[in-house]
Image (tube, grey):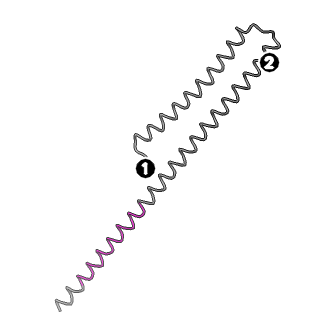
Amino acid sequence: MATHTERFTDMNQTSNLRTVLMALLVGGLVGAGTMLFLAPQSGKKLRANLAQKTHELRDRTTDTVKEAVSQVKSKGLHLKDGVRDRAEDLQHQGVDILAEQLDRIAAAAEAGKKALKSSR
């Protein structure tokens, strides 16, 4: 089971990922706006260039989001496997404890029978 530190680290990594995605998006928008104001090109060339840069930004953002989703899925599967393993361990411990208790009860019952036979 994840410790408090591991959960905090996972939340911190998720927060960092969001920050990176937002920075990428804002940076792209600022870059596109700057390009509009500083580009010494004709309107037609500027629109074509803007469309190209917009597509490039969209593609980079799509790739980044796909990578982030892949990381989240991978971490989710890892956590699920860890929880499953821990649950199985606990189940085995429970079975072992139950077997020990049953052995103790059987030994106590046997001792009780012997005590009854010897008192007769």
**Secondary element type, mark 1:** loop
Does 40 appear above or below 11?
above
Residue ID for mark 1: 1
Select label 1 or label 2 by which is in front.
2
The image quadrant of residue 61 is: top right
Q: Tell me which residue sits at (70%, 13%) in the image.
A: 35
Left or right placement of residue 68 versus residue 111 in this view = right
Q: Which residues are magenta?
A: 90-112
Q: Residue furthest left?
A: 119
What secondary structure is the stretch in magenta mostly built from? helix
Q: How packed is label 1: few (under 14 Cα within 10 Å), some, or many (20 or more)?
A: few
Left or right placement of residue 60 versus residue 87 in this view = right
- Residue placed most toward the observer, 102 or 19: 19
Residue 30: x and y, percent? 64, 16
Is 111 colored magenta in this rendering? yes
Does 39 appear above or below 89?
above
The image quadrant of residue 21 is: top right
Circle nearer the N terminus (1, 2): 1
Is 67 colored magenta in this rendering? no
Residue 48 shows which numbered tag? 2
- Residue placed most toward the observer, 111 or 34: 34
- Residue placed most toward the observer, 105 or 1: 1
Q: Tell me which residue sits at (24%, 86%) in the image.
A: 113
Amino acid type, residue under disc 2 in the picture:
Ala
Quadrant of the rendering where the C terminus is positioned = bottom left
